[in-house]
Image: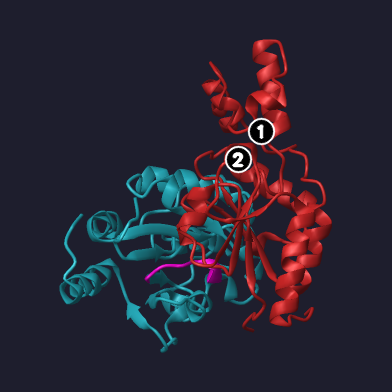
Chain colours: A cyan, B red
Amino acid sequence: MENHKPRIALDMDEVLADVVPKFLDFYERDFGRRPKKEEWWGKKIYQLPNAAHIRGYLHEPGFFADLPVMEGSVETVQWLCRYFDVFAVTAATEFPNSLRDKYDWLEKHFPFIGWKKLVLCGDKSIIWADYMIDDHAYNLERFKGVPLLYTSSHNVDETRFTRLNNWAEVRAFFEEEIRKKGLVPA
Amino acid sequence: MENHKPRIALDMDEVLADVVPKFLDFYERDFGRRPKKEEWWGKKIYQLPNAAHIRGYLHEPGFFADLPVMEGSVETVQWLCRYFDVFAVTAATEFPNSLRDKYDWLEKHFPFIGWKKLVLCGDKSIIWADYMIDDHAYNLERFKGVPLLYTSSHNVDETRFTRLNNWAEVRAFFEEEIRKKGLVPA
């Protein structure tokens, strides 16, 4: 059966999963102090002075296994699934140890998305969907549907895309889409 | 930089990787004899009488780790990469133990494809590409580009798609596409 709900491709890291606290933990472990938000806001934690090695921790088994869920995302994605065909699309193949962790994390926190609608990939330009929510401009630049930038410290200066600051704003954006398009829950 | 080569999405199992010998091995182990080709041609090995449990072996760690490469595929994919943007797109999320095996298998046999162009997914209707080579009609049915059916025992009665019987035919098909579209190697 063809599915005619409009499709949303949801990024995982920094959209569904909060990566920042873990990076801050690693920074604190390695440098003996937790950096203040004004230090890292506007960049990635591993772009702080002498902290480039912290990106390497993404390769460690377990890094992605216990990330906290973004506030409000579970309830809102559950609601979105009534109107939209929701996929989780995550850049994972750069970090082969993340593959199983990301699968397990999604099954644990978003079991209603399910394995059929999980995409573990590298280059997201292969994704076909109506909407993409992502924190990386380079994923949205080449996307053929409606690009939606989820705010993350590293993208605060980006101005080319509709910005969603949190999951309440995601919900408000799609309430308006549902109204404009006259979508009904399936 | 935008990549303007036409894109090909290549399935892995039964297109790049030969799954049949391993299924035959399991059948032989469980039933004490190797089924003849005329028994399983036209279906999957696990559709033989009393053999439904064999599909469950796909869940075992290592199942995908040591599959043989389809004859002629390595050289032909290497050649295709000169003219096309080649992705490996494999249904893997149904079998979480396969994720790392499939990553490792591709890195071993097709390192020139690389992690950026590996997609581990469930429902392939999310894939955007110009061509898709796949042995499953249900993946091709919903594909928006040119669907190409790679012959496998279970699809021999399928008539809706251009059929490619082996990697020599894949090469011949794309030689003609390159000629018609005037593509030059990048």
Q: Is residue B112 visible?
A: no
To which residue does mark 1 refer?
B63
Element type at mark 1? loop
Element type at mark 2? helix
Q: Distance from label 2 to label 1 (Cα)?
A: 7 Å
Position of residue B113 relative to residue B178, above or below, is above
Residue B156: image quadrant is top right
Can you give x and y, in whole percent of width and height, for residue B104 in the image?
71, 47
Can you give x and y, in whole percent of width and height, for residue A10 in the image?
40, 63
Can you give x and y, in whole percent of width and height, for residue B70 in the image?
77, 45
Residue A156: image quadrant is bottom left
Which region of the structure is painted magenta?
A: A124-130
Badge 2 and badge 1 both on one subunit: yes
Position of residue B97 relative to residue B102, above or below, is above
- Horizontal side of A183 relative to B145 (left or right) equals left
Dot 1 alpha-carbon crowd within 10 angstroms: few under 14, some 14 to 19, many 20 or more: some
Residue B148: image quadrant is bottom right
Q: Which of the numbered marks, if any, corresponds to residue B127?
A: none
Q: Amino acid at mark 1?
A: Phe
Q: Residue at x 27, y 70 (%)?
A: A170
* Residue nearer the viewer, B27 or A170: B27
- In which chain is the residue bearing label 2? B
Q: Is residue B131 visible?
A: yes
Q: Is residue A133 magenta?
A: no
Q: Residue at x 54, y 26 (%)?
A: B47
- Horizontal side of B70 relative to B124 (left or right) equals right
The answer to whether mark 2 and mark 1 are in CB contact below 8 A is yes
Q: Is residue A126 magenta?
A: yes
- In which chain is the residue bearing label 1? B
Q: Which of the numbered marks, if any, corresponds to residue B98?
A: 2
